[in-house]
Image: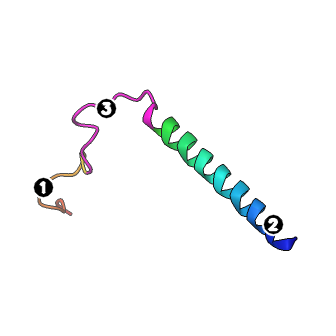
Amino acid sequence: MVAVIYIALNFALTSFASWLERRLRRAKKSTGAVLTADDNQPNAGATAGGGGAL
């Protein structure tokens, strides 16, 4: 009897996790944000050479 409860609980958790993962993946794709080429640069504000004058 304990094995049946264990299997049912694992099945329920696996089904919920799969549903939640699909839902989160779908929501991430449609953020509506529009990025330009400059927005996608990792260090867009950084200058070459590192430090400035102290």
Quadrant assignment, res 7 = bottom right
Residue type of the residue flagged with mark 3 = Leu
Specify whether residue 21 is painted magenta: no
Q: Horizontal and vertical percent for residue 44? A: 24, 45
Q: Earlier in the sequence, mark 3 or mark 2?
A: 2
Secondary structure of the residue carrying tag 1 is loop
Q: Horizontal and vertical percent for residue 3? A: 80, 72
Q: Residue at x 12, y 55 (%)?
A: 48
Q: Horizontal and vertical percent for residue 39? A: 28, 38
Q: Residue at x 27, y 41 (%)?
A: 40
Color theme of the render: rainbow
Q: Earlier in the sequence, mark 3 or mark 1?
A: 3
Residue type of the residue flagged with mark 1 = Ala
Q: Dot 2, crowdedness within 10 Å: few (<14), some or many (≥20)? A: few
Residue 35, numbered circle: 3
Residue tagged by mark 1? 48
In the depicted view, which residue is nearer to us: 2 or 15? 2
Q: Residue furthest bottom?
A: 2
Q: Dot 3, crowdedness within 10 Å: few (<14), some or many (≥20)? A: few
In the depicted view, which residue is nearer to us: 3 or 45? 3
Report the magenta residues as a range: 29-42
Residue tagged by mark 2? 4
Secondary structure of the residue carrying tag 3 is loop
Q: Residue at x 11, y 60 (%)?
A: 49
Check the image and report above or below for 49 versus 28: below
Q: Residue furthest right?
A: 1
Quadrant assignment, res 23 = top right
Residue type of the residue flagged with mark 2 = Val
Distance between the alpha carbons at the discs numbered 3 and 1: 23 Å
In the depicted view, which residue is nearer to us: 15 or 1? 1
Q: Main secondary structure of the magenta part?
A: loop
Distance between the alpha carbons at the discs numbered 2 and 1: 64 Å
